[in-house]
Each structure stands twice: as C-alpha cells, then as structure tokens.
Image (cartoon, rainbow, N blue to C red):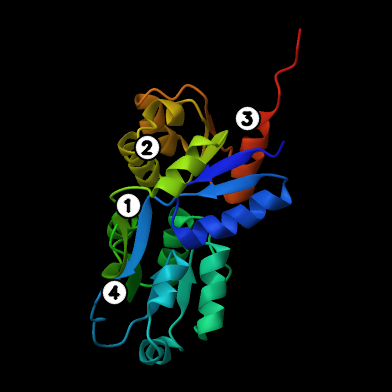
Amino acid sequence: MTVTIALTRAQDDAEATAAALRLRGFAAAIAPAIEIRAVAAALPAGRFDALIATSPRAIFALDPGERARFEATPLHVAGERTAQAARDAGLMLAGAPAADSATLVGRVAAVLTPSARVLYLAGRDRKPTLEAAFAASGAKLEVVALYAAEAREAWSAREARAIAGCTAALHYSRRTATLALALATRAGLAERFRTLVHVCLAADVAEPLRTHGAERVAVAEAPDEPRLLTALERALRPSPKG
C-alpha cells in the first residue's frame, strides 16, 4: 500500500515536493497552510550595487520593466530554484546560489564595500536573520516586500479528508507547521494530526509540533529537501524486531 505524505507548504512548492515524493514511491496530499499573493510595492529609485533574493517568488513578482532595469545588476541568491528563476528572467547571477541566508550574506559582504547599496527582493512574512546579519556587516541594505504568504482560514473538506488519510507530514518552516496545527484543529483533526510522523527541515521547525503534543517528530540532518526526504524514509522504516 502506498504511503501518503501531507504537504502543507504553498501550492506551487507542494506540487514540486509531491513530484519528488512520487519518485521515491510515496503519494502526496496537498493542503496548503498559506497562500502566496503579490504585494503592491514601489521599488526604490536609483542605482544598486547588488540585489539579493532568497525565493523564486521575488523574481516572479518583478514586472518586465523592473527586470530590464536590473538586468546588469549582480544578483546574489540562495537556493537553486531562485537561481533558475533569475536565469529565466534574464537577470545576472553574481555566482552559484548559496545554500542558505547566512552563506549568502557572507558572500555579499566579502565582495562589496560597507558603502555599497544593496536591494533585498523579499517576502512580507520572513525571518529577520538576513537583515540582522547585514546590519552586523555594516553594509547598507534596502528591503522591498514583493509578495506575501498569507495564512489560510481553513482547509476545504476535501483537503481535510486527505490529511486524515496520511501517515506522515513534511514541514519546511516553523510558521507553516504552526499554521497547519491550527488548521487541523479547526477541521476537527487535532488528535489525528498529532499522531502523524512529522519530519521537519530544522529543529526550530519541529518545536511547535512537539509543544502541541506530537510524539513522532524527526529532523533532517541538514536543511535541504534531499536530506528531508531521506529523514522521511528513515522515520518510516520499520523498527528492527528483537
């Protein structure tokens, strides 16, 4: 029998993960905890020495005129999907994508002077990690929010039924894990959701699940999807009998 995995990240991300799960022999039930919406934002005027993006959604949110404006500005990104979105948009990558925000900040700080002007193409709902690291480096960072990950009020009846039939759930962020817990409660699935095997990208993602009583929680060895899927397979492996 095929094991079904709950995916509560945004729809487009969940669909990509579902494809990866199918390659490993799993089925997926998609019930997003958030919806991505564009944010009306005016980009700051003037020239920038560099751009930063940590999500492909920031690239998608740029209109053709904005892309043309920045096509010659070095773009530093985190993650291969962000890098591919930049290539598709005709933007100039400053180098290979960084694995995470901390690495990204280190790279930018190493090649720019403290007086450099840097624009962060960001989401409205984000951790302050990157901005705090930039503040510590002394570089001037300007931030514009181009999209928002808005919390959903409820799952549909179909989504709730799909989640109820799952064996495990994958969690990529602390926020979506927390929102998924709330959605499960509203759907009358609080206890069922707690009994799933919850596999998380990092320890801080797992914290709200453990706080709310989930007992079978696993964390990936490193914060990337291949290791997350490996952690899922390990967590579902039958215990040796002895």
Alpha carbons under labels 4 and 1: distance apart: 24 Å
Number of the label disc, if any, that sits on residue 115 = 4
Asked if the residue at tag 3 contacts the one at tag 2, i.e. Cβ–Cβ closer than 8 Å, the answer is no
Asked if the residue at tag 2 contacts the one at tag 1, i.e. Cβ–Cβ closer than 8 Å, the answer is no
Residue 18, given in percent of the width and then of the height, sits at 60, 53
Q: Is residue 216 left or right of residue 235?
A: left
- What residue sits 36% from the left and 59% below the top? 35
Residue 196, given in percent of the width and then of the height, sits at 51, 30
Asked if the residue at tag 1 contacts the one at tag 3, i.e. Cβ–Cβ closer than 8 Å, the answer is no
Q: Secondary structure at mark 3?
A: helix
Q: Nearer the viewer, mark 4 or mark 2?
A: 2
Q: In the image, what residue type sits under mark 4?
A: Ser
- Quarter of the picture holding the N terminus: top right
Residue 214 in which image quadrant: top left
Alpha carbons under labels 2 and 3: distance apart: 22 Å
Q: What residue is disc 2 on?
A: 184
Alpha carbons under labels 3 and 4: distance apart: 48 Å
Q: In the image, what residue type sits under mark 3?
A: Ala
Q: Residues within 10 Å of mark 4 (few under 14, many from 20)?
A: few
- What residue sits 52% from the left and 39% below the top? 169
Q: Residues within 10 Å of mark 1 (few under 14, many from 20)?
A: few
Q: What residue is disc 1 on?
A: 127
Q: Residues within 10 Å of mark 3 (few under 14, many from 20)?
A: some
Between discs 3 and 4, the one toward the N terminus = 4
Alpha carbons under labels 4 and 2: distance apart: 48 Å
Q: Nearer the viewer, mark 1 or mark 2?
A: 2
- Quarter of the picture holding the C terminus: top right
Q: Nearer the viewer, residue 25 or 192?
A: 192
Q: In the image, what residue type sits under mark 2?
A: Ala
